[in-house]
Amino acid sequence: MSEEIDILIAAQGFHQLIGDLLEALDDEWLSQVHSRMRPGGRIDLASLGQAIFFEQFRFTYAEVKELVIHLDLPGEFVCPEARVKEDSFTALCMLLRRLASPARLCDIEMQCGWEATRFSRITRLVAQHIYNRWKHLLRFDPTRLTPYVLEQFAQCMHAKGSPHSHVCSLMDGTLEEISRPTRNQRLVFNGWKRMHCLKYHVIISPDGMIIHVFGPIEGRRHDEMCFKQSGVLQILEKHFWTPGTPETHKPLIVYGDPAYTVSTHVCTPYKGAALTEAQHLFNTRMSRIREPVEWVFKEIGDQFGFLNFTKNQKLLLQPVGLYYLVAVLLCNCHTILHHLQISQYFRCKPPTLAEYFQGGPVADEELDAWCLQALWAEMDVPDE
């Protein structure tokens, strides 16, 4: 009996020793973490002034609350690998702060009290959730963009000065510079711009919304190649028609630069050295209509400066394409809430958040592959 008591006492002493050791390790870790953070611990987001909150997160406090609802975020985000969790409002603020401007994780740690690894894991988790839930809006949303809505877009552009009454949207490609990859860098090197980059292809409507985005693909590709790979031509042939029966409806047109091939639903400027006066006039008037497609790229970069910080756009280390596509969705949210330059230019009101965020999540392996997989990391392309 006495031996059993001695064994129990020894076991209790051992467990107490282990507990004291773990507590000491926790105290040491916390002291290291708190030494890097702001005095007072984590920031109280509700206590920030409206101007400061908008500057840091690109939306007001009330708008972020509204976005949590319309983005259909869960009550909390749990990262099983690190056993950390965060409520949806704070998690979305973390993502917005990450995208708003380039900053070192240690600087954010000192500014907001969000531990660096926790911040990084939660940020990626939120971006992945938003993409998985709403990626169908990046391809095309026929539920909202009905023939009647597309015809209204054409009327807005015609009222602004478009000589073609059936042009309802604009398209273009953009290059986003990235850091030089350590492997197969030639695949993403653009010889025209002399930089390593990824390419995206977008279509915008006169209400300032990006209604289609495709990418990322290798930066060496031409806009026409990007257009063909995107499958957008099939979307145009299926959905871009005026209201009516198949016998009476007329094609609606997307206007692009001279790099594209003219077709039933695609229109470009007249090309050649010997243009007539009418053709010159058409090109001049349409160039004023097409100019806003460049504004949308500027708007994405202005609102989410993290995407412009080339040294941190490391293709093989982080999901560069994922962050850009999520930024496109958030930029659309910003356009809805603040009616930015393009919608004012065409006098075309954007939809509400409830009208924009509709439809359930879809499984699209092809779209996921373009966004999330760096295929060039697995290929062996010798450098010259």
Image (tube, rainbow, N blue to C red):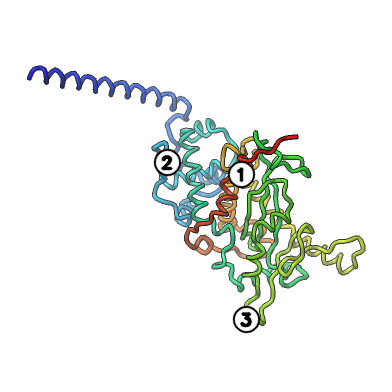
- Answer with left or right where residue 271 lies relative to residue 229: right
Q: Inspect the image, locate mark 3, and give the three-letter code of the amino acid beneath it.
A: Thr
Disc number lying in front (2 or 1):
1
Q: Position of residue 371 (x, y in %)?
A: 58, 49
Which label is found at residue 79?
Answer: 2
Q: Is residue 210 above or below residue 320?
A: below
Kindly identify the residue that appears in the image at 90 percent across and 67 percent down.
276
Q: Residues within 10 Å of mark 2 (few under 14, many from 20)?
A: some
Q: Residues within 10 Å of mark 3 (few under 14, many from 20)?
A: few
Q: Position of residue 344 (x, y in %)?
A: 66, 61
Q: CA distance from mark 2 to mark 3?
A: 51 Å
Disc number lying in front (1 or 3):
1
Label 3: state its secondary structure: loop
Which label is found at residue 296?
Answer: none
Q: Inspect the image, locate mark 1, and give the three-letter code of the amino acid beneath it.
A: Leu
Q: Quadrant of the N terminus?
A: top left
Q: CA distance from mark 2 to mark 1?
A: 26 Å
Q: How many marks?
A: 3
Q: Write down the residue under mark 1.
A: 375
Q: Write down the residue under mark 3.
A: 245
Q: Quadrant of the C terminus?
A: top right
